[in-house]
Amino acid sequence: MRANSKTRTCSSAHLRWRAPECLTRRPTFASDVYSLAMCMIEASAGEPPFAFLDDDDVRETLKSGVVPEKPQEMSDQVWELVVSMTHADPSKRVELTLVIDTLKTLATEDLGDGGVTRCIVCTALVLDYSRSVETSWDFKTNRPRAVGRRHTSHLPSVVVELDATSSIVDLVAVLRSGSIDEQESAVLLLLQACICDHTRQQMQQENGLSALEDLVKTGRTHLLQVCALGCLCWSCELDSTPPDAEFEALQETIGAPTESECASLAQMLRNNDHDTLRTVMYCACAAGANGRRQLFNAGVVPPLVTLLGSGNEALTIWTMDALGSLACDGEARSAIVAEGAIPVLVELLKNGSETQRGFAACVLGQLSADSAFNSATVVESGAIPFLVGLLRAQATIPKNFAVFALDGIAAVRDEYGVAIARNGGIPRLIRLLRTGTSRQKKLAACVLGWLANQDENRLEIARRGAIADLVTLLRSGTQNQRESAAFALSFLAMDRASGAEMTNSGAIAPLVALLRDGTQEQKEHAVCTLGSLADSHQDHCRKIVDARGIGPLLSFLRTRNMEQKGLAAQTLGCIATSSEEHRREIISGEVIELLVDLIRCGSQEERDKGMFALCYVTNHGRADTRALASKTIISRRTSRNISSSPPLGGLRVLMSARK
């Protein structure tokens, strides 16, 4: 049982194993049959039924009559039995006595020569005559499986070579002391394990990360180094451990593959020999490290796209991983599309396993990034409903990559954001914002920001209570989360009611902090948000001043590009209208010079913002007239042929619009 299950209340402690009818009435023998089937699924999959759904979602799933998918480790005979045990109508379920007889028969039939047996539920090899199993990983099927656990001390020790039945503990041990061949086998098996939440977390608990870090630094082959880094990449991406900065530092220690190595990889991919899976995994990790350009030049894209249709689940998954890493390069992205990858990926998104759907979402997201044509192709193929549906997946990978893809698509056109909302995306994104992993929260905030550029979406996001969650992320999230939260709030702040809710939720102080000390992107989003807040109500202006926001805005006006200076100028102009005291705090000879420079050098929109600020900072020209005259604003405006009207006349429209 997972650790977080210990916090469940008594009323929901056994919810995942209950029959649907037990939600409304007492259990019967038929209910026990259903619960036994759930236990069989758990024994095979290595985790509880519906492990990654919360209790509310489990209840809804049970009501709809849905059962967990067939674990790939479970034999067809056992699955047929499970199906008969989980019929939605209790009266149509198989009798318990028949279940027991069937299990006995299967166990007897499965006995092998020499005392070798297999688990009757998940078919894992058991080497000690025991029927009890523990979780490991099946390299071929890309899913967790069971491994025999020795219970009798009198049996002789059995030495087994590394394979799909090797435990996580053994694999980590081999990383530390095995031969080169053993280490390569172990790291590839661990790489497979990393895309399953249960086995990846088990690897972390067994101190596997430190062994992998050592291998990145001192591995004796390039494959060892990049595949160890690949394992760490999954742990960083999905669990934020190691932190991004530490992972990037490790990444810098690995050299790119040589030209001959890349040519050899490309040739092996074209030959499609018996080591194709190993080759594809090596290619994926090398591209993810720092070899995507070299691999692309070697010609790996065409054979990889061909392998998408191999029909082998594990091979398809790691092929998509390789293509996703390569697609970070613009030329490779174009080549992948030209080879016809998008229709195959969309088909996998719609009809593949949950893990395949997640990886397909990843590649489609990479291909859609900054490409109107690719995004349109993906959207027109009907991908959006399936991407939104993946936001409720059980495992981490499908949710991560679905929200990643939606972020790339929503950034291209507002109408795609409308389609995401119409397919139920907003409540699911808000749920990720509240309960997702660190990266899911960051990406969910980004997508909500893009969606908030539409009035209808903006109102729904606010109505569902997301503003308080975004402010919480702004105040206490990671650097990336703060940037995404500020981005989303900059769009939501365009609505007056939402702006008031932000202010009441305490958004202004952390926004000013970002404006003062944040990254360039954080500062840009913060000044946009503060500008909208200042423009909507004078009370917001006062709170910006109380948070010591004038100083950072003046610094922005001094040091940023012309567009950002225009935003700072507009915000200062709004603050100047809130009180004479605030106006005097802003006004200085330097401010006037900076505003005049903006009027002289900026675009039409930036000049308007500069004139707007100058108007209010100088009290409509009635104050500081000597300073204004010294800057010869009239001559500057005339020389630009902006207008023959008086220097402040051009802002009348802007000022009337604010009244």
Image (spheres, rainbow, N blue to C red):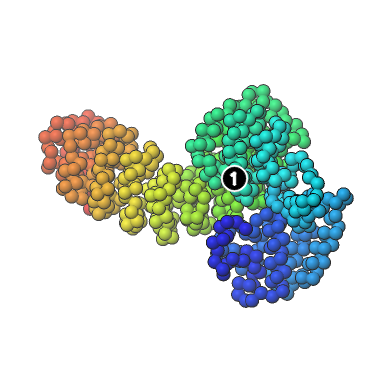
Q: Is residue 176 visible?
A: yes
Q: Is residue 649 visible?
A: no
Residue 322: horizontal and vertical position, in percent? 63, 37
- Residue 245's place in the image compared with 239, above or below, is above
- Residue 14's place in the image compared with 412, above or below, is below
Residue at 70% x, 34% y is 178
Indicate the quadrant containing the N terminus: top left, top right, bottom left or bottom right.
bottom right
Q: Toward which corner of the image does residue 644 lie, by quadrant?
A: top left
Q: Residues within 10 Å of mark 1 (few under 14, many from 20)?
A: some
Residue 320: horizontal and vertical position, in percent? 64, 41
Q: Which residue is mark 1?
A: 204
Residue at 70% x, 52% y is 134
Residue 200: horizontal and vertical position, in percent? 62, 46
Q: Is residue 140 left or right of residue 461?
A: right
Residue 562: horizontal and vertical position, in percent? 32, 34
Most foreground residue, 545 or 295: 545
Q: How many marks?
A: 1
Q: Is residue 446 left or right of residue 2?
A: left
What residue type is disc 1 on? Gln
Most foreground residue, 603 or 495: 495
Residue at 50% x, 46% y is 439
- Residue 66's place in the image compared with 276, above or below, is below
Task: Label 1, secondary structure: give it.
Answer: helix
Q: Toward which corner of the image does residue 41 lie, by quadrant?
A: bottom right
Residue at 55% x, 40% y is 366
